[in-house]
Amino acid sequence: MEKKSSSNMSMILMIGLGIIILILGIVAFYFYNQYQNIKKNPNQVAQAETDQLVAQVGKLIDLPKDETPTVATVLDKEKLKDQPFFSNAQNGDKILIYTKAKKAIVFRPSANKLINVGPIAIDQKSQVQVALINAGGDADGVTKKLNDKFAGTIAISSTTDAKNKNSVKKITVVDVSGQNADAAKQIAAELGGEVGALPAGETAPQGSAIVIFVK
């Protein structure tokens, strides 16, 4: 009788262990699937992050309805300390810039708090310098889209041809300065492209902060 009871207990333990392994496998598969989707659709992720941020800020203040803001993250507050509008900004704060409305917002997600809101004049010096490298795409169409969407926040500094057009598979936005990750995501989402690295053999034109390979 004791032997049978021990056998039943072992069977129960094995079944329980099997169920745990099955659950862990399902969870692992789910997160792997999510990770693969993020890798395939970085633009959708960037857009979702922007939409979530706009929804969060929109609960605190009325926002322009006819445009999507350009979003930046404060990475080094010391670089902004000489600009009065950003004097109270901290690392991790989000900056929303509405070009058409000429409005800027400094928002602190960690405290769900508006740090500063007001009109902002964007001059040529503060614009992100963008270079277009044509790899067989519609450079004129891309230029128009960028001017319509990001007028005032970016400046197209040059347009040249790619050295090897076959190395570019789709519209690719490269943050060559390493300082404009959010802007690169916004541009890629607007153009239906992706954020990536410089294709083999290509170089960034001098003075450009972002390079767009047009395919």
Image (tube, rainbow, N blue to C red):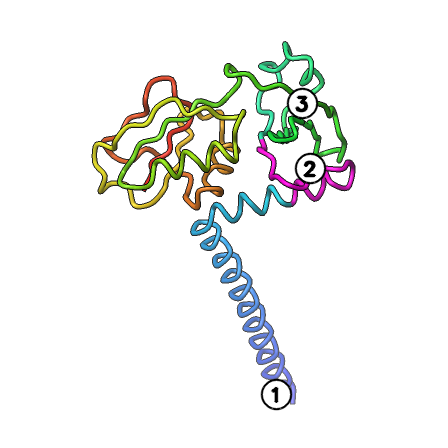
In percent of width and height, residue 193 lies at 41, 44
In percent of width and height, residue 111 lies at 75, 33
Question: Dividing the picture into quarters, in which one does residue 96 lie?
Answer: top right
Question: Dividing the picture into quarters, in which one does residue 103 lie?
Answer: top right
Q: Residues within 10 Å of mark 2 (few under 14, many from 20)?
A: few
In percent of width and height, residue 36 lies at 45, 54
**Res. 4 mark:** 1
Front tag of 3 and 1: 3
Residue under the point 25% across and 31% down? 161
Q: Looking at the image, tell me whether mark 3 or mark 1 is earlier in sequence order.
A: 1
**Left or right of 41: which side holds 10?**
right
The amino acid type, in three-letter code, at marker 1 is: Lys
Out of 136 and 91, give the one closest to the viewer: 136
Residue under the point 51% across and 56% down? 34
Q: Which residue matches tag 2? A: 64
Which image quarter is the C terminus in?
top left
Q: Looking at the image, tell me whether mark 2 or mark 3 is earlier in sequence order.
A: 2
Labelled pair 3, 1 in contact (Cβ < 8 Å): no
Out of 70 and 35, give the one closest to the viewer: 70
Tag 3's secondary structure?
Answer: loop
Q: Is residue 85 magenta?
A: no
**Left or right of 156: which side holds 113?**
right
Tag 2's secondary structure?
Answer: loop
Q: Which residue lies furthest to the right in this view?
A: 60
